[in-house]
Amino acid sequence: MSNLQDRVAVVTGGAQGIGGATARRLAADGARVLIADINPDAAQANVARIRAAGGVAEAITADMAQRPHIEAMVAKAVELWGRLDLLVNNAWGGRGGRGSALTVDEAGYDHGMNVMVKALWLATRYAAPHMEQNRSGSIVNIASVHGMLMAPEALTYETAKGAVIALTRQMACDMGPLGIRVNAICPGHIVTENMQARKWDHNPGLLPFFEQQYPVRRVGKPEDIANAARFLCSDEASFITGHTLVVDGGLTIQLQENLGLHLARFYRDHPEMDLDR
Ligand SMILES: NC(=O)c1ccc[n+]([C@@H]2O[C@H](COP(=O)([O-])OP(=O)(O)OC[C@H]3O[C@@H](n4cnc5c(N)ncnc54)[C@H](O)[C@@H]3O)[C@@H](O)[C@H]2O)c1
């Protein structure tokens, strides 16, 4: 019997990208998966993919910026399958919120914080009572290496992802006695369908430069994060809570001046590379 057999999971932003791969991975291990996403067509396509592989999945159109949608998402999973065990808080569409403290747009900041931080709290508030009933709960929050290392002109994203790590640790303290574990994952650069279209289709020649920044000499795939999420959801991780699992091919373990020199040498040897993104 598979490790997640009989478990019920909700994956936010589960239509595509990291969430899409995570939904498929949990379903492949036997979980019944509710995909909650603002993109109904992509969500249905992922449901069809899971069913074609023999899994069980449904979709609900839900915007993580809207509290009633989050409440309805949890209610739907319980209505469908009578319980809720796993919650992967993953959704983020990358809309708005760019800029520094001097330039960031207030509406974009609020939207980013609502989807990337507040929604994680609200989803946990609605999900936890159901998880507590079976003393079987695992919540996985998708943070980022941007929650640990800061980039310029990205106030909203960096602040939100740092907050996800703190929120995870805090909620793990409160939820542990209820039988619920809460962990975070910090992905490095993951080439999703959207990332491929947004970045790499336009400048595929830059990809080797990115890959050189990783000790494993590759960037990530959605499946790399899905595998980590599946592990944290499973009973194999039953003594792990409040943890931030960095899944970044070693990107963030490197001393920065060494990495800078390495990249300078790489660029010297490949002057044809177009570094404009
Ligand atoms: N791709 C990366 O390199 C990377 C790296 C680190 C962290 N992350 C994090 O991983 C998560 C997933 O990112 P991704 O790259 O797979 O994104 P993606 O754009 O490929 O997929 C995001 C999914 O979330 C959905 N979504 C967007 N806004 C939503 C909302 N308000 N409510 C419900 N669903 C919504 C989209 O429709 C889409 O299906 C995000 O939290 C992101 O910050 C991504």
Image: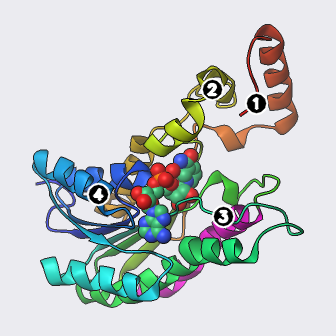
Give the image location of residue 269, x and y in percent.
Answer: 79, 8
Of mark 4 and mark 3, the one earlier in the sequence is 4
Residue 154, placed above or below residue 197 = below
Task: Look at 40% across and 89% down and name the residue there.
Answer: 68
Type of the residue with mark 4: Asp
Asked whether disc 1 touches disc 2, contact meaning CB atoms under 8 Å apart, the reply is yes
Secondary element at image label 3:
loop
Type of the residue with mark 2: Asn
Residue 277, placed above or below residue 124 = above
Numbered circle sitting on residue 203: 2
What whole-number distance in Å separates the C-alpha atoms at marks 2 and 3?
23 Å
What whole-number distance in Å separates the C-alpha atoms at marks 4 and 2?
28 Å
| Prevalent SS, magenta region | helix
What whole-number distance in Å separates the C-alpha atoms at marks 1 and 2?
8 Å
| Residue in front for this viewpoint, 257 or 12 | 12
- Please tell me whether residue 156 belongs to the stretch shown in magenta: yes
Of mark 1 and mark 3, the one earlier in the sequence is 3
Question: Which of the 4 image quadrants contains residue 40?
Answer: bottom left
Numbered circle sitting on residue 96: 3
Numbered circle sitting on residue 276: 1
Give the image location of residue 62, x and y in percent.
Answer: 37, 74
Give the image location of residue 16, x and y in percent.
Answer: 38, 51
Query: Is residue 275 shown left or right of residue 46?
Result: right
What whole-number distance in Å separates the C-alpha atoms at marks 1 and 3?
21 Å
Residue 153, placed above or below residue 133 = above
